[in-house]
Amino acid sequence: MLTPTPLAPVSVLGLGLMGTALATAMLKAGHPTTVWNRTPSKTGPLTAQGAQPADTPAEAAKASPLVITCLTTYDDVTEVLRPLTGTLAGRTLVNVTNGTPAQARAMAARAEEHGIAYVDGGIMAIPQMIATPAAYVLYSGDESAYEEHRPTLAAFGGTRWTGADPGLAALYDLSLLTGMYGLIAGVVQSYALIGSERIPAREFAPLLHDWLNAMTDAMVPNTAEALDTDHHLTTVSSLAANQAAFPNLLDTFSGQGVRPDLFEPMRHLLDRAITEGHAHDGLSRLVKLLADR
Amino acid sequence: MLTPTPLAPVSVLGLGLMGTALATAMLKAGHPTTVWNRTPSKTGPLTAQGAQPADTPAEAAKASPLVITCLTTYDDVTEVLRPLTGTLAGRTLVNVTNGTPAQARAMAARAEEHGIAYVDGGIMAIPQMIATPAAYVLYSGDESAYEEHRPTLAAFGGTRWTGADPGLAALYDLSLLTGMYGLIAGVVQSYALIGSERIPAREFAPLLHDWLNAMTDAMVPNTAEALDTDHHLTTVSSLAANQAAFPNLLDTFSGQGVRPDLFEPMRHLLDRAITEGHAHDGLSRLVKLLADR
């Protein structure tokens, strides 16, 4: 008779929408899963699926060599873990709480003081996407702990190692979110403009979708190439041409009764680029102008 | 012996980078092409390819039933065409100069007074893309004139009719450019952030590319659906969750020495959305908040 290899146990602390999705993914993958939440009622749906509820964070930590924290802020993580640093010593802490690179580095330093292997994680998915092929998590920090637990972490979706600097997962994560928020600003402003003439959004959506994907395909690799080679001159779309076109855009917003606020800073940045002598450069020059130092 | 059907003659006024690309496309497609430019030297490369140079705009207009203007501004178009309204009567004017919906409507009204069939065009391509499958032009205005000349206009790439209101091509064009400028803001800020730790841009580019395309795929149709059904509640990513995450992002910009200017207005918009009671709504609510009226 074949005995299946028992899967590694895992503990999940913090059962908001994301923590619940993570614990669910572990249960579905067959890992013995212990869960804890400050408000114990949130453990109900998970225990119904086979999770072991813990009364305290220490009890949860004792149950598994791999402890995952998914709380609201890094301050919450610090507060919840403070009483159990002794329990965590020798275990791996994977912290997927949203935070900054600086917060991740400080957390890693404290973990190291207490003999805790620290891996920071940045989840590139909404809760509904966890355990689907579209989801992945960025990791950084203690590479050997990461490699040891990678088969378990794969229950969430793809795994991407970003480096030993524990701040890197957060940096990559926030850089991707940054790109997304620019896209959001563009999409909402675009729909506001087309909506000013009562054109149905669904009629315009396919054009907007295809256009944005085409621009992403062209712009993202080209800008990277220009940045890495430090070669900013362009024959395609100069900052001068963009600066010349921009007032037209802002005038149209005003003329159509759409607030221009989201786009005012881009006008200032283009103006500054021209004033500082970069008329013939492409978009990569703007990246340099955004660096304060 | 087979005699090929002679192709319709066309005249192009304005030979900047885009006008030159348009005239070149017409020549390559086999149309007898007459060209005019304020600075006559620009006609040289085109006459070498078989174009007929015209000494005056009127001479160019006389040569073809289809006259295409591609100048810097609508004021330039008005100035160039003022002396030849009589010549243009009974012909079709396709104006692809960049402008606003209001400018296009005013131009169409003047054209109608003089018996000129007016079609406004918005080119969704850079000059290098003209006559490739990726290029297309949006048109609006006189639909029968458009249909008559569509086989000729197809030399530029795809043709997309937006409606009889002559301002629509400009509105669609500017709405797509609006989306693109948001995307540009996101991409340059994202590269600035990842560059703050000297990570090569080409290492990050594939992640950014795939992430932005995935977000476009999800966000563009979902937002359109929410807008057209006027149903803004979301279970995916609430404005409250976005507002909570945003200060983290701005703090990271500052901490990494990257100017936050481009993203400040989005913070204000999210704050306003929460203050006005839209915490549980999704991004489509922001579109409504951008409408001034």
Image (cartoon, coloured by chain):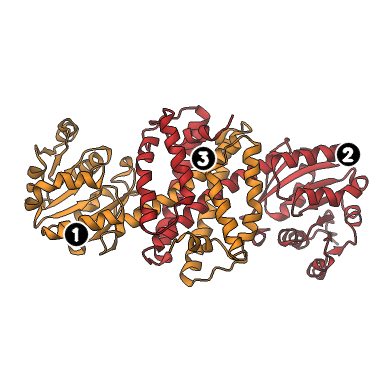
Chain colours: A orange, B red
The 10 Å Cα crowd at callout 2, few under 14, some 14 to 19, many 20 or more, is: some
**Residue beneath disc 1:** A109
Work out whether residue A150 can be spotted. Answer: no
Residue A188, numbered label: 3
Type of residue at label 1? Answer: Ala
Residue A233: x and y in percent read: 58, 68
Work out whether residue A232 can be spotted. Answer: yes
* Picture layout, residue A96 above or below residue A108: above
Q: Please say if the residues under marks 2 and 3 sit with CB atoms less than 8 Å apart.
A: no
| Quadrant into which the N terminus of chain B falls | bottom right
Q: Residue at x 13, y 60 (%)?
A: A113
Residues indicated by labels 2 and 3 sit on the same polypeptide chain: no
Q: Which is in the foreground here, disc 2 or disc 3?
A: 3
Residue B210 falls in image quadrant: bottom left
**Residue beneath disc 2:** B115
Q: Residue at x 40, y 67 (%)?
A: B200
Q: What element carries label 1?
A: helix
Protein chain holding label 3: A
Left or right, residue A57 beside residue B109: left
Q: Is mark 2 on a helix, strand or loop?
A: loop
Please report whichever mark, 1 or 3, sits nearer to the chain's N-terminal start. 1
Residue B146: x and y in percent read: 77, 43
Type of residue at label 3? Answer: Val
Task: Name the foreground residue: A88 vs A268.
Answer: A268
Type of residue at label 2? Answer: Gly
Residue B136: x and y in percent read: 65, 51
